[in-house]
Image (cartoon, rainbow, N blue to C red):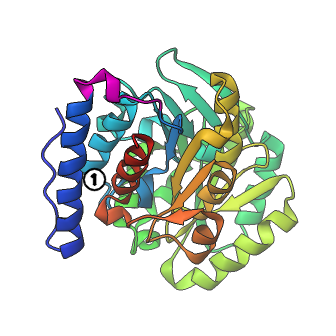
Amino acid sequence: MIHEFRPGGSARGAFFFAAEKRMLAKFARMRHNTSMKKTHYYKIIAFDLDGTFLNDDKSIPPANLRALEAAAERGIVPVVASGRIYRGVPEALKALPFLRYYILSNGAAVYDSREDRLLYRGDVPLELALRCYEYMDTLPVIYDCYQNEQGWMTRAMMDAAPPYFALEPEVLKLLYGLRKPVDDLKAFLRQRGEGLQKLQMFFKPEDEAIRQRVLRELPTLFPELVATTSVKNNIEVNSVNAGKGKALMALCEALGIDPARTVAFGDGSNDVEMLRMAGLGVAMANASAQVKAAADCVTLGNEEAGVAAKIYELLEEGER
């Protein structure tokens, strides 16, 4: 059961709540009137989590859940498209019976949860990852990785983490929940001998200028890698063979769906490729100028259930 949506005190929040009630009433009538049902143009809705589908406190606006349900009832496939691993996806989303496909670790993996198998994979080769970590050792950062759906981090770096998350306390909670500490990350990875889904580094708030410099120079130093960001204090590093856009295209191929019939929602630089490659790229109002420039349109912010607002708009257009 999806809980009742309680809008905020803003006039825009109250307006959206009223609009959502009208849309839900309309879809309820359509369920009992098959002559009114039409095939919607869009077949996939892919959505980022942090800063997009989730509130800033990492909770899920109930309106977003209801909008996904309404879309699924029209035959549209919802797809999580996150920098997180599967274990990091909120349980309320994984519990939805119609949510099957997940783009994970910024497109390093496409996961079919119903069949428990990967449809696509784009890892960073181990030796390349280790060279990148040697570069990170010259910076004022702590770092970690995702490998085979598990996060790993040097224990001393995990212990030193709090000052790096002064502006992102909710992300710190995720870090503690999704990483296992090891004595020496590089030595541990050499012993395992496998590639990585994603490398990630974190900066203190006072080192923002350094973070911006690293975002610019890392792809030049490592052309086989892509550097993006999803929260205020991080840089995420993936293989050029990964990317949410590439992963979305791989999913389209697996499902036999025209990429032009996809919608993608995002707010961070790790969403830019996906917004550009989707049939309709939708940036959040809280997104950066770079992300908005890559999108076809802009919806309300994540704190105003902007994903739901745009989904309802698209569903209404599809029923005309």
Give the amino acid at mark 1: Ser
Looking at the image, which is closer to me, 218 or 267?
267
Quadrant of the snapshot with the N terminus: top left
- Judged from the image, the secondary structure of the residue bearing numbered disc 1 is loop
Quadrant of the snapshot with the C terminus: top left
Horizontal arrangement in the rendering, residue 43 relative to residue 211 (left or right): left
Q: Looking at the picture, does residue 204 appear above or below residue 192?
A: below
The residue tagged 1 is: 59
Horizontal arrangement in the rendering, residue 66 relative to residue 279 (left or right): left
Looking at the image, which is closer to me, 17 or 319?
319
**Residue 198 location in percent, x, y?**
64, 47
Horizontal arrangement in the rendering, residue 132 relative to residue 146 (left or right): right
**Residue 152 location in percent, x, y?**
55, 44
Horizontal arrangement in the rendering, residue 15 relative to residue 162 (left or right): left
Residue 229 at least partly seen: no
**Residue 69 location in percent, x, y?**
32, 35
Looking at the image, which is closer to me, 313 or 196?
313
Residue at x 46% of width, y 32% of height: 76
Residue at x 57% of width, y 82% of height: 207
Q: Looking at the picture, does residue 238 appear above or below residue 11?
A: above
Region of the chain picked out in magenta, as a range: 31-39
Q: How crowded is mark 1: few (under 14 residues within 10 Å), some or many (20 or more)?
A: few
Residue 165 at least partly seen: yes
Q: Total label count?
A: 1
34 within the magenta span: yes
